[in-house]
Image (cartoon, grey):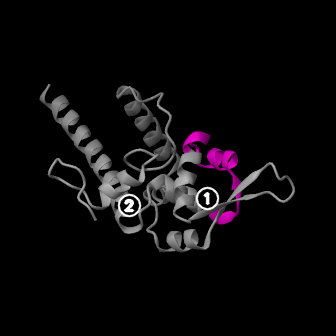
Amino acid sequence: MALQKDNVDRMLSALRRVIRAIDLHSRQLVQSHGLTGPQALILRTLLDGGLSAGALAKRVSLSQGTVTDILNRLEQRGLVTRVRAENDRRRVMVELSAAGRECLASSPPLLQDRFASRIEALEDWEQTLLLTSLQRIAAMMDAGDLDAAPVLSSGSVRATPEAVEEVVEPHTDGGPPKDR
């Protein structure tokens, strides 16, 4: 019985380290570049050329509503632009702006990129073992049916400017954020 408790404790500690690594990386990205993980993923996806919001949503595995919300925030910051498609004026294409390219070029690699390259280096059987183990853990935590994009980021994918500001300059006195 003691061995089972020890294993449970070690598993919980490992999960906590994963959660903490994701949180630290997310905070670093926000602090250094004012970007959430999903925002950086969308900018990176647009490097290959403009896409409609719907196509972009499919490419990054987020709902169209979530992508539209993120695009609104990126457009307000001048990191993306929306332009009507030349061949069909009803279609709006989202393109990366020069400021978006500059921001992306100076941002650190996304956590999932490092993770993916390390996973891809494993043998097929080991990848399958890890996948089934993670799927089982998700199910055991009643998270098996939750919709989740393949992005390692903490917090909401729809982070507001205020939430980003709170990460950049957190206030800890329990009161409202200090004037800046």
**Residue occupying the point 38% across, 61% down:** 30
Is residue 99 located in the magenta-colored stretch of the structure?
no
Instruction: Determine which residue is flagged by label 1.
Output: 45
Q: Is 49 part of what is drawn in magenta?
A: yes
Q: Secondary structure at mark 1?
A: helix
- Amino acid type for the residue under numbered disc 2: Val
Q: Is residue 111 left or right of residue 80?
A: left
Look at 37% across and 48% down and name the residue there: 154
Residue at image point 46% right, 35% down: 132
Left-right relation of 5 to 155 = left
**Please, is residue 101 above or below residue 161 in the view?**
below
Q: Nearer the viewer, residue 67 or 110?
A: 67
* Count of numbered badges drawn on the protein: 2
The magenta segment is 46-66
The x, y position of residue 47, in whole percent, is 63, 65
Q: Main secondary structure of the magenta part?
A: helix
**Image quadrant occupied by the C terminus:** bottom left
Q: Which residue is mark 2?
A: 30
Residue sitting nearer the eye, 72 or 17: 72
Quadrant location of residue 164? bottom left
Q: Position of residue 51 (x, y in %)?
A: 70, 55
- Is label 2 in contact with label 1 (beta carbons under 8 Å)? no
**Above or below for 129 versus 114:** above
> Which image quadrant for residue 140?
top left
Q: Residue 159: image x %, image y %?
A: 42, 49
> Amino acid under label 1?
Thr
Q: Residues within 10 Å of mark 2 (few under 14, many from 20)?
A: many
Secondary structure category for the residue under label 2: helix
